[in-house]
Image: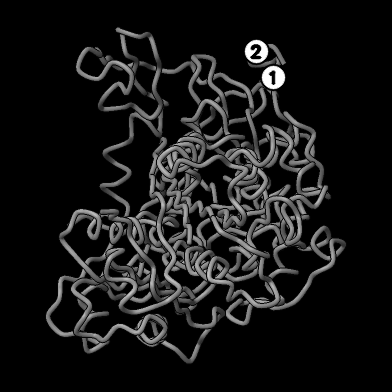
């Protein structure tokens, strides 16, 4: 038996570390997380791995001020739906910006961060969070 | 021969944080109450179905169907347990409806129950979060209130919904619950208090959110031709419809409308051969106040984007054209997850029977309940008539 959280994270590492999803070559739709079946084309669909660029903009967000223990130390934190440039959305924390400066439409890029710990002696989950794009990183602000 | 399904008995326990009562105690209370209300004997009941979301995590107990039949002294009977997150109660009602309609069962006891206050805050929050997509939303820090906050913020941006409007469902529902002796919060709350209550996940506040509640509700349902044997005031399920949507909120094209609500409501009206204007009383799933605003739009009371305006104009209060959540709704009656969908039907049945006392909608003949699971991945609509 796997320690709490270990297998659950390990088998998803490509997606949660690198934002790897997939794409249906039949209808040209991108999916994140990767879908086992294209809901539009189903058996006519052809799914291939797709590495997302990790760029997008904030679709909606909330400032979390009451959270379970695993996230308490980060409060208040910004959680958002980010619309990736490829057209799909994901749910992620927004970091490196004051909550009061976050707004819908803000351009963001993926970064690699610690997400949470599975209890005091449990596995540490790393993965994507998003931060505002900056000129120094070669992105339009 | 008409083969509608009748509701001949209703019951509940008083909702609240019931530290002195177990899951079994409250389930039994609601079940006994509804059986006594119906006039059936235990031996007349040929099946039981219970809606529950997560007793395994909230209390450690699963296999609730068998437990309820056993504790109720009902002996050897088929006892089913169904789960659809916050729509588990509605799912239980629908399962019994389908079972009776098919002819497999004649008289059924329908229960909904959730005991939420036996665990700490972290466990409660995480358990509620698994109603949405746990691996891709909850695990990344999206609490359940945060997901509804996404909807609220988009609704405010797209349609200009104001903070005052966001507070109004709470004010209305508390005012209604003041007349419901089963409700968790039987008191009015002024709008200023709602608007200054603590932030859960901006822009959502504590008083925009349904509470943690222990509670159970029950119904006795049977074939139409058997109903007269037991009661002079049966009410009937005119239609039962269920629709679905993506599990994760981020996979929906729009997060300011719930397609499953639109589709289940339309189908239910069509199946019952009714139009929205024929409905006299509504129970709409207000786990957060933005939920009631979005649902008033999606069932058709308000045009899209005008849910805030409609509540402001008083159209959804008792005495208005389309009274919504006369019971106090999830906000003030309380939201014991698996019990909610059953409690909505209890309220509609009382309204149609004329037994809703001070919160009675005069002459109510048709009622619509919409019970949703997660952030709208399941929607179950029931239309009742008398």
- In this view of the protein, which residue sits in the foreground, B195 or A96? B195
Task: Name the image quarter holding residue B103.
Answer: bottom left
* Mark 2 to mark 1 CA distance (whole Å): 6 Å
Kindly identify the residue that appears in the image at 57 percent across and 53 percent down: B284
The local secondary structure at tag 1 comes to loop
Chain letter of disc 1 in the image: A
Residue drawn at x 39%, y 22% as measured from the top left: A31
* Screen quadrant of the N terminus of chain A: bottom left
Residue contact at pointers 2 and 1, CB within 8 angstroms: yes
Q: In the image shown, does A132 or B109 lie closer to the viewer? A: B109
> Which dot marks residue A139?
2
Q: Is residue B147 left or right of residue B317?
A: left
Density class for disc 2 (Cα within 10 Å; few <14, some 14-19, many ≥20) is few
Residue B242 coordinates in the image, percent (x, y): 38, 44
Of residue B220 and residue B175, the one placed in the foreground of this image is B220
- Tell me if I can see residue A127 in this picture: no
Q: Position of residue B24 (x, y in %)?
A: 34, 84
- Secondary element under disc 2, as helix, strand or loop, is loop
Residue located beneath label 1 in the image = A134
């Amino acid at each position: 038996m796997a320690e709490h959280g270990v297998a659950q994270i390990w088998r998803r590492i490509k997606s949660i570390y690198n934002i790897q999803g997939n794409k249906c070559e039949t209808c040209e739709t991108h999916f994140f997380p990767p879908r086992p079946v294209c809901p539009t084309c189903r058996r006519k669909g052809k799914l291939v791995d797709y590495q997302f660029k990790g760029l997008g903009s904030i679709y909606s967000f909330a400032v979390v001020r009451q959270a379970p223990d695993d996230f308490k130390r980060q409060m208040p934190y910004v959680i958002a739906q980010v619309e990736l440039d490829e057209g799909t959305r994901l749910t992620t924390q927004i970091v490196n910006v004051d909550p009061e400066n976050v707004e819908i439409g803000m351009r963001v890029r993926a970064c690699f961060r610690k997400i949470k710990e599975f209890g005091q002696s449990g596995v540490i989950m790393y993965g994507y969070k998003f931060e505002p794009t900056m000129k120094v990183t070669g992105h339009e602000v | 021969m008409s083969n509608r399904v009748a509701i001949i008995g209703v019951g509940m326990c008083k909702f609240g944080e019931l530290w002195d009562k177990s899951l079994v105690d409250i389930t039994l209370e609601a079940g006994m109450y509804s059986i006594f209300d119906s006039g059936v004997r235990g031996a007349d009941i040929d099946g039981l179905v219970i809606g529950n979301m997560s007793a395994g995590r909230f209390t450690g107990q699963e296999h609730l169907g068998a437990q309820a039949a056993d504790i109720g002294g009902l002996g050897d009977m088929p006892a089913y347990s169904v789960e659809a997150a916050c729509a588990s109660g509605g799912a239980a009602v629908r399962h019994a409806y389908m079972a009776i309609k098919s002819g497999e069962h004649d008289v059924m006891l329908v229960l909904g129950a959730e005991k939420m206050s036996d665990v700490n805050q972290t466990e409660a929050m995480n358990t509620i979060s698994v109603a949405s997509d746990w691996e891709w939303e909850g695990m990344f820090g999206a609490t359940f209130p945060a997901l509804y906050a996404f909807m609220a913020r988009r609704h405010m941006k797209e349609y200009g919904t104001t903070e005052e409007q966001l507070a109004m469902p709470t004010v209305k529902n508390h005012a209604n619950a003041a007349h419901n002796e089963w409700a968790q919060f039987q008191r009015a709350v002024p709008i200023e208090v709602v608007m200054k209550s603590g932030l859960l996940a901006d822009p959502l506040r504590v008083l925009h959110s349904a509470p943690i509640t222990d509670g159970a509700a029950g119904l006795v349902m049977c074939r139409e031709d058997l109903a007269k044997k037991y009661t002079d005031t049966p009410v009937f399920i005119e239609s039962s419809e269920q629709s679905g949507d993506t599990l994760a909120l981020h996979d929906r094209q729009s997060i300011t409308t719930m397609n499953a609500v639109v589709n289940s409501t339309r189908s239910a009206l069509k199946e019952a051969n009714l139009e929205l204007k024929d409905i006299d009383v509504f129970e709409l799933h207000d786990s957060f106040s933005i939920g009631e605003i979005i649902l008033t739009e999606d069932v058709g009371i308000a045009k899209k984007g005008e849910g805030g305006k409609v509540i402001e104009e008083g159209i959804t209060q008792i005495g208005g054209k389309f009274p919504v959540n006369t019971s106090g709704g999830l906000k003030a009656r309380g939201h014991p997850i698996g019990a909610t969908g059953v409690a909505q039907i209890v309220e509609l049945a009382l309204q149609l029977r004329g037994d809703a006392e001070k919160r009675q909608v005069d002459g109510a003949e048709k009622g619509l309940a919409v019970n949703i699971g997660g952030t709208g991945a399941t929607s179950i609509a029931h239309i009742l008539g008398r």
